Amino acid sequence: MRASWRRGLIGTAAFTALLELLPRTGLVDPGYLPTASTIAGALAGELSREAFWSALLDTVRGWATGLGVAIVTGVAVGVVVGVVPGLRALTASTVEFLRPIPSVALIPLAVLMFGTSMESTLMLIVYASFWQVLVQVLDGVRDIDPVTHETARSYGFGVFTRIRVVVWPTALPHVMTGMRLAATVALVLAITGELVIGSPGLGRQIALAQSAGAVETMYGLVVVAGLFGVVVNLSIRAAERRALRWHVSVRRENAV
Amino acid sequence: MRFIRSIAIVTILPAGLVTAWWFVSLGSDNFFWPPLRDILGTVPSTWLEGRLQADVGPSLLRLAVGYLLALLIGVPTGLAIGLSTPLRQYCEPVFEFLRSIPPPVLVPVIILFAGIGDTMKVVVIAFGCVWPILLNSVEGARAIDEVLHDTTRIYRLSPVSRFRHLLLRGASPHIVTGARQALSIAVILVVISEMFAASNGLGFTIVQFQRSFAIPQMWSGILLLGAIGVTLAFVFRLVENRVLAWYFGLRRKQ
């Protein structure tokens, strides 16, 4: 474990050094790729600007709202479709058809409906992450052990109790996977929406920095976007382990 | 009878939805939600008279080149890294960071290096797609059974056939998962890069329709883009079923 940490640090340091040296030695034009230290300097400058923080806040808010809506609707629709007999077969072809439609296809529609406000980005986020959650929930509900299900029925459990004690725990690992995928997709779409549509947020700041020729600032903001992604990934994984600490897969990992 | 039943189950909801859209929108005079009849009516004049070659063709070509490039770089690199634990540990945090960067952000960055031509779009697609492929290849190489490794060594398989029959085969379920994620990223990126800066392509054309308020044409573009996404997913499924036939068969047996 210690060795892996040390190697990770060495790898990161080497990568940073490479970013510093490539432009410094002239192998890459510094006008295209500024040195790591210049990027860090520009980033530090950004951190003291209010516009940066409000942009970051806008992105976080859009991301969280869109993700929340997608998770709630995805889980609700998924459980209903999975539990009601026959509904899954009936909707399968429609889900399979709607899911691969690229969310960016909706950008022009979103712009027409909501202009450059946050709602247009929100629409993209919800559409893209909803399918991630829904498909996983459907998979999870299908995973239910028929014997457990029959047992619950023989004991005369009502529909809601059955959903609570049989369906939900079985589906939860899949739901968490869906959330993890959806969180990443939601971030991509949040930044995309801001970048292309121009709704307020980090993505728009990046586009502004690019058109203003502020290359260091642009790289600094890209780094922030990446770090945001890392934080999202790590925290979702931590949440997953916590929510599933009773589950065999996590218990086995902890035991080793 | 059973066959007819299953066909009916598959088609009834989509058919119902399209019919509902057709009839609900029939009398629509809302500017943004034109009747489906008008949208479909504009399809021949909008797309079939030259745009299919002039715009859809280049988009698909960029997509294909970028995606193949990502596969060619991502799979061997990922497998190599997956074979060596120290190498993986050195690279892990950097990869974790690079793959967390939302790929569309690369568009303004790569414009700096490559201008706004086709190179930029291909590089953006390749760079965005390479991460899921690479990281899944790493996982795939790690997941291969130790015993199989030793067996191939004892039988003195040549490095080339070990790569082909052990590494590539053994990691292919993971690689396919990565390739599927990468495909949807590729579609997003080709459209985004064309919306950002282009003179042709699907993304460019659709935004052009939107800006000139050619609403039925814009809708037809959205539908076409959706159809391309669905078709690509379908083709991918066919390839997957072929490449992973051994794997699905194995799982059914278990």
Image (cartoon, coloured by chain):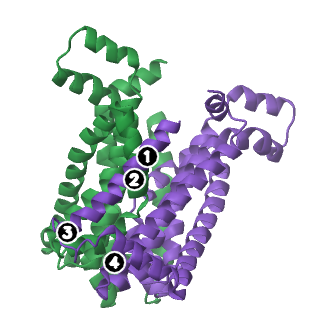
Of the residues shown, which amino acid type is indicated by label 3?
Answer: Met
Which one is in front in this view, the residue at disc 3 or the one at disc 2?
2
User: Could you tell me which residue is drawn at 42 percent across and 82 percent down?
Assistant: A205
- Cα gap from disc 1 to disc 2, whole angstroms: 6 Å
Q: Is the residue under label 2 in contact with that under label 1 (CB below 8 Å)?
A: yes
Secondary structure under tag 1 reads helix
Q: Chain of mark 4?
A: A
What secondary structure is marked by label 3? helix
Residue at numbered disc 4 = A216
Mark 2 Cα-neighbour bin, 10 Å: few <14, some 14–19, many ≥20: some
For chain A, the rendered hue is: purple
Is A144 or B48 nearer to us in this picture? A144
Residue at the extreme right of the image, as rendered: A156
Q: Which residue is disc 3 drawn over? A: B120
Q: Mark 2 or mark 4, which is nearer the start of the sequence?
A: 2
Which label is found at residue A12? 2
Same subunit, tags 4 and 2: yes
Q: Residue A14, relative to residue B199: is it above or below? A: above
x and y percent of residue A182 in the render? 53, 57
- Relative depth, front residue between A51 and A68: A51
Instruction: Give the chain letter at badge 2.
Output: A
Q: CA distance from mark 4 to mark 3?
A: 20 Å
Location of residue A175 in the rendering, given as x and y in whole percent from the top left corner: 62, 48
Q: Residues within 10 Å of mark 3 (few under 14, many from 20)?
A: many
Camera-side residue: A109 or B180? B180
Label 2, secondary structure: give it.
Answer: helix
Chain of residue at mark 3: B
Query: Does the CB distance between marks 4 and 3 fall below 8 Å?
Result: no
Instruction: Say above or below: B186 vs A256.
Output: below
- Drawn colour of chain B? green
